[in-house]
Amino acid sequence: MRFSTSLSSAALSLTALSSAVSGLVISKPVEVSALEARAFEYIVKPKVFIVSMFKPEQDIWFGIPEFDILGLNITVPGLSPLFPDVHCTEDGEVCQVVTGESEINAAVTIGSLVRSPRFDLASTYWLIAGIGGGNPEHTTLGSVTFAKYAVQVALQYEFDPREIEANFSTGYVPLGSTTPDEYPQNIYGTEVFELNENLQKMAANFARNATLNDSTDAIAYRAMYAASDAYKAATAGPGINLCDVATSDVYYSGTILSEAFSNFTTLMTNGSGIYCSTAEEDNATLEALLRAAVEKSVDFSRIINMRTISDFDRPYPGEAATYNLFYAAQGGFEPAIANIYLAGVKVVEGILHGWNSTFAHGVNATNYVGDIFATLGGEPDFGPGAPQEGGGTALKRDLESGRRMRRSSSGKRYMPVHIGRV
């Protein structure tokens, strides 16, 4: 697009005037055509971007005393029809996007956001802040979890439990494999993401300054888990946990499925992952951010994955899985929503207050950060060939061009199956 000399001069003047506003780079001039004005819209450079998934997670950030997230509202093409606007503080330092629920909504929303010309996201910290289910072996209702690993647990073969082999503990089998405990032979790239562990710990320390919410129903429901020593963590009050998140569009409940996905988390992280929370969107959000990081428009080492626990992923001993999901008054939803804000605002404030001293130049990651393909460089500490906890390595595979021989449906012939980017 070409501009007249007078418009160019006006733009330079406005750029200089707006330099004092930390989150905004260019402001819109007065009395120009609509086409020309678009080029001078605010370019927002957030320090923190809050990622919510549905309305209750969005609304908890409205009307808070720390900042006004509705100070600047920007419609972004490609966002969810239910949540078409990004909300920001007036200075642009803190913004919020709502993805809509499920992996598809999250991928499309974040993919659209990171390519919007209205934002400069190269130095932005991302706070994925939602509720999720909780594993009573490691966490409890109302707790706030911060993940190092996000594992796409339902990216597997699935058989109805009534038709599985007698020696199978679950109907889920890793892709390309023939038993539930075999490492997947077909790798798609979204199975596991590893985030900046130093940033994870810093965020958790900020959150520890919060006084978390609870409910009488949650206290009563937690007590039912005291019947099993394995669920000691479930009987405690809300706290801060460093453990990992499982992503699945399947809203699952029950001990068998939860244990199966816990085992898959262990398998995919080579023994170092701790499955404690569930989500529908996180791996999709992370994949969209990773692809933007390839283009240097996002820094993948600046992502915080926070989930608060609204319900248990399995029943207490003697309770039916269906009752646990459909009918039980677990009492965790309201505290979990409240704790998104109570813990999350401490994280946001910690980043803002420490911007000049710590966060502007980034938090150095001493662990691997990225996906199973090492798309961003480095050496993954999970996946085929990576060291396993307790010694040894996982099955070695060439992720780029590996092939293996797989039995055909006739059981007599073999055919090569591509492994890697497809």
Image (cartoon, grey):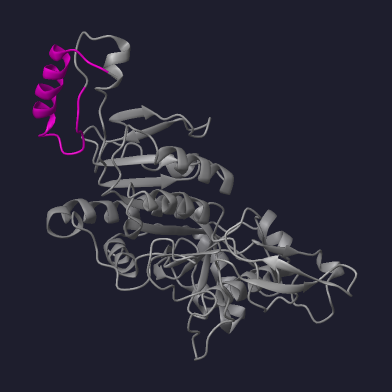
Task: Give the x, y percent position of residue 156.
Answer: 68, 64
- The one of 405 and 330 positioned closer to us in this rendering: 405
* Image quadrant containing the N terminus: top left
**Residue 151 relative to residue 211: left or right:** right
Q: Is residue 38 left or right of residue 393?
A: left
Q: Is residue 89 above or below residue 211?
A: above
Q: Residue at x 32, y 32 (%)?
A: 118
* Residue 344: x %, y % from top left: 34, 53
Q: Quadrant of the C terminus?
A: bottom right
Residue 11 lies in the magenta stretch: yes
Q: Residue at x 57, y 49 (%)?
A: 103
Q: Is residue 214 visible?
A: no
| Closer to the camera in the image, 226 or 34 | 34
- Quarter of the image where one finds residue 408: bottom right
Q: Residue 7's x, y, as percent?
A: 17, 14
Q: Is residue 1 magenta?
A: no
Nearest the viewer among 211 and 121 is 121
Residue under the point 52% across and 57% down: 132
Report whether 318 appears left or right of 389: right
Q: Is residue 160 above or below residue 234?
A: above
Residue 346, percent from left and from top: 27, 55
Residue located at (53% from left, 30% from top) = 81
Q: Which region is colored magenta?
A: 2-27
